[in-house]
Amino acid sequence: MAQEADSPDYPDYWEADVVLRDGGTAHLRPIVPADAEALQAFHVGQSESSIYLRFFTFKAKLSARELARFTNVDYVNRVAFVITMGDEIIGIGRYDRLNDPAEAEVAFNISDAHQGRGLGSILLEHLAAAARENGISKFSAEVLPENRKMITVFNDAGYEVRRHFDDGVVALEFDLDPTERSRAVMASREHRAEAKSVAALLAPGAVAVIGASRDWGSVGYSLLENIIEAGFTGPVYAINPQAFELNGMISYGTIAEVPEPVELAVVAVPYEEVTKVARECAAAGVKGILVASDGFSQAGNEGLQRQRELVRHARAHGMRVIGPGSLGLLNTDPAVSLNASMAPAMPPRGPLGLFSQSAAIGVLLYTAASRRGLGLSSMVSGGNRADVSGNDVMQYWEDDAATKAVGLYLESIGNPRKFSRIARRLSLSKPVIVAKSDVMGLQLPPGHAVRTTQAPMGALDAMFRQSGVIRVETNEELMDVAQILVSQPLPAGANLAVFSNSLALGNVVADAAKAHQLDVVRLETGMDLNTGQSKALPVLRQRVRQALSAPEVHAAVVTLLPATGIQTSVLAEVLRECAEEAGKPVVASFTGVLDLAERTDGLLATGDGSGAGTEPAAGGLQRALPCFASPGSAVNALAAVVRYAEWKARDKGEYTESAGTDPAASQQQIDALLAGLTGTDLLTPSQEQTARLLGCYGITVQDSAGFTNDDEAVAAAERLGWPVALKTTDARLRQRLDLGGVRLNITDATTLRANIAHMRASLAQFGDIPLEVQSMVRAGQACTIRAIEDPLLGPVVSFGLAGDAVNLLGDWSHRIPPLTTVDVADLVRGPRAAGKLFGYQGLPAVDVPALEDLIARVAQLKDEHPEVALLELNPVQLSDRGLAVLNAEVRLGNHAHRTDSARRAMRD
C-alpha cells in the first residue's frame, strides 16, 4: 500500500509502531488516498452489525465518493489514522472539525477480528494528540446506545465525559486537555501491553532455532543445545534447510514447515539472510524473534538501514524483536526453564532480573552473577536494542512476582523520559540498579540509532537520582549492590555498627563509612577469634546480636582477618543467622582469604563454602550473607542501598500546575512566531515577545529599555521610575560589576548622563557595546535558571547561583520535568553554593518559596512546549521579600516531536 509521504502536508512524524493490549504490535499512520482499496476491503470484511453501529445504517460497499472523502484529508481540519498489520487495515479513527473551530467530531471503526485488543484506545490517544496540535480542545461523538464498546472507549480514556440522550443517539463530549487520570490511564495501558509483549518472549509456548547447526561450537549449535539441556518445557524445533536431523530431532527446512504455531524464533543465520528469515517468520505467525546474528553494526549505514527495515517489518506484522547481536534470553521459572542464550548452563533460580545491551557485557554480568552465587529470575541481552529495550523489560519485571531487584547495564537510552517515568514507578516496589557507561549519551554505541546529548554534565545522573535508580560505574559494582538487595532487608536508616578483629581495619572501615555519609554509632574492634571455634563463635554471635537489637543500629558491617581454626563459611553462617533474626542487613568482608574454595565475593551461607542454600526465601530474598573480599566494596555497596532506602521512604511530593497559567495562549504565540521557520534554525523572540510568552506562565521580567543617546536614556528612566540601573546588554559583561558593565542606584538625569559617558569610555576596549536602563530591585543573591530541550533527555531544568559558581565551577543542579514539589525543592538545594540562600555569614535568607514557585513555572512551560529550545532567566535577583527576573532569553525551534508525548508509540 503506497503512502504519499512525499506530499508536503503528510505528517510523517505522526506515524508510530504501537503495542496492543495483548502484547502484539501494529503500525499506526495517517490515512492517504492510496488507501482506498484497502479501506474498501476493510469495510466489506466487517459484519452487518459493525457497519450499522458505525454508519447508523447498512452499507454493503462504500461508494467512490465516500472512499474519496474518507481517504482525502488535510491533516488539520480533517484527520484520519489507520492501524495496519502488514497491508491489512485493522482499525480506523478520524476526526472532523465542526463549526466551532475548537471542537471536532470523532469516530472509530475496528475490525471484527481484532476487537478487544485496545485499538480504539490507541486511536483516541493519537487523534487527541493531533487535535491538540491543530488547536482543537474538545471532542464530541454520536453513538448508538447499543454500541457499548465504543462508549466504553471514551469512558475509560480518563477524560471527563459529558453525555446526553438525543433522538435515539447518545451524544458524548469531553475536553482534550490531559488530566491526571487520563495520563494514568495511558501509562497503565502502555505498561500492561508492553509487559505482556515481553512475557510472550520469555515464556513462549514453542521455540524454533533458525540456523541450528551440527557444527560444534557454532552459535546455532550452542543455542539449540542450551535450550534442550535447560529442559525447556515446550516443543523445540530445529530449522536448517541443509540438515535432516539435528541434536536427535527432525530438522525442518523453513519455519513454514513447522506443524504448529511458534511463539519465539531464535535466529542464528548469516547477516545477509536475517531480513528474509524475519519475513518468513512474519508469514508463519511467529510472535517474536531473537536475532543472535551480528554484522549489522559492522556494516555501517547499510546495516543500520537493514536493521530499521527488519524492525519495521516485524512490528507491522505483530512481532517483537530482540537484538540484533543479542546474547539471548533466559527464564529460570521451572514452568518454562528457557535458556535461549549462549550461557553454557542455566543459572540457579533467584530474585534478580538482568538486562544488558552489549553481548560482551551480558557475558560479564552472567559470569559475575554465577561467581557470586546470585540466582536469576530472567535475563535479556538487548544487543543493538533495535526494538526491545530496557524500558520494555522493566515493564515486565514490575509485574513479575519472581523478580525482586533489577540490574541493567546501559550504553544508551532510546527514550530517557519514558525510562525515568518507568524507573520511578518500578523503584517504589523493586530496586533498580543501572551500570552506566561513562560516555552514555555522548557517543553512539555500535549498531544503535539513538540521539546524543547536549545537556550539561550531571543531568543524566540527576535523572537517575530523581527516579530512585541506584547508579553504579561497573558491572562488578552492580553485582556488589545486587547481592545485598537480594539477600538482605532494606535498612531503616544510615546508622551502622562496625565489627572487626583488627583495630586498624575497623577504623579504616569506619572512616570509609563516614565518607559515604553513613553514621557509625557502634565500633567494636576488640574481638579475639583465635581462641578456638567453640569459644570465638559464641562471642561473635552475642556481640553482633546485641548490636543489631539496638534501635539506633540500622545495619552492620563485619570485616574480619583470617582466624585460626575457623573456616570463613562458618563465620558467615553465624552472621547470616544474626541478620535473619534481627531483620536488619549485615554485610561481611573476609580480608586476606586466599583459598578460592572459600567464596569471599558473593553470597555465602553454608559450611562447605559452596554457596548452596541460597534459594529464595519468604519475601523473595535469598537466605545468604553478602560477602566481599574488600571492605571498601562492602561499604560502598551498602551506602548505595542506604541511599535507595532513604529515597523510597521519602515523601515524593505532588505534581502540581502553577496558578494563573495559560498554555493554550502561549502555544498560539509560539506557533505564530515559528510560522515559516524550517530546518534546524532557531528564532530569538524580541524582548516584548519574550515577556508576553513568559507572562502566560505568570513570569514577569523586570522592565528595561535600550537607548542610543542620553536623551532616550533619561526619558526611559523617567518612565521606569528612579532609581535605575545602567547596564550593558552584552552577554559577557551585563553582570560584570567589576568590569564596569553594571552601575546601580542612579537617582537623577545628571548622574545618569555622567554614568553613560563613563561607561562608554570604560567599555570602549570591548567594542561598541549597547546599553540599557532598568528599574532597580531589592539587593540580594543573583541566581540562574536555565531550561533546554535536549535531543537525548528531552526537557532539562537547571539551577545555580549566578556568576563564578556556574560559569567557572559548573555548580548546577538538574532535574527532568515534570517536577513534583519535592523535585523543585531538591533542585533549589542541589548546588554546593545553595547554602547562601538560607542565611550565610549573618545575611538574611532569601525568599525560597518565591524561587520554588518560579522554578515550577519554568518547568511547566518547558515540559508543555518542546519548541522552546532554550529558556534562560539570568540573573534572577533574590531578596528576603520576593524576587525579580532581570533578564530573560528564549530561543524557539521546530521541535523533534518528543518520543514520550501524550500518545503511546514505540521507540523508533
Image (cartoon, rainbow, N blue to C red):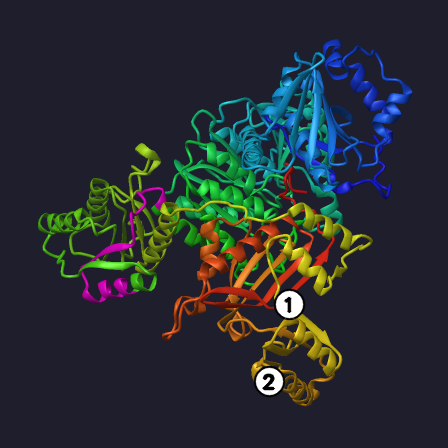
Q: Using the image, determine if residue 634 lies above or below residue 62.
A: below
**Magenta span of residues:** 485-511
Is residue 855 left or right of 274 when viewed as pictured?
A: left
**Mark 2 sits on what residue?**
739
Q: What residue type is disc 1 on?
A: Asp
**Mark 1 sits on what residue?**
703
> What secondary structure is found at the residue carrying circle 2?
helix
Q: In x, y percent, where is residue 468?
A: 44, 48
Residue 519, numbered circle = none
Q: Using the image, determine if residue 746 lies above or below residue 832.
A: below
Question: Which is more N-terminal, label 2 or label 1?
Answer: 1
Q: Is residue 493 magenta?
A: yes
Q: Quadrant of residue 125?
A: top right
Residue at 17% in and 61% down: 525
Residue at 34% in and 52% down: 642
Q: In x, y percent, where is residue 203?
A: 52, 28
In the image, farthest residue toward the right: 64
Closer-to-camera residue (168/218): 168
Can residue 277 be seen here? The reply is no
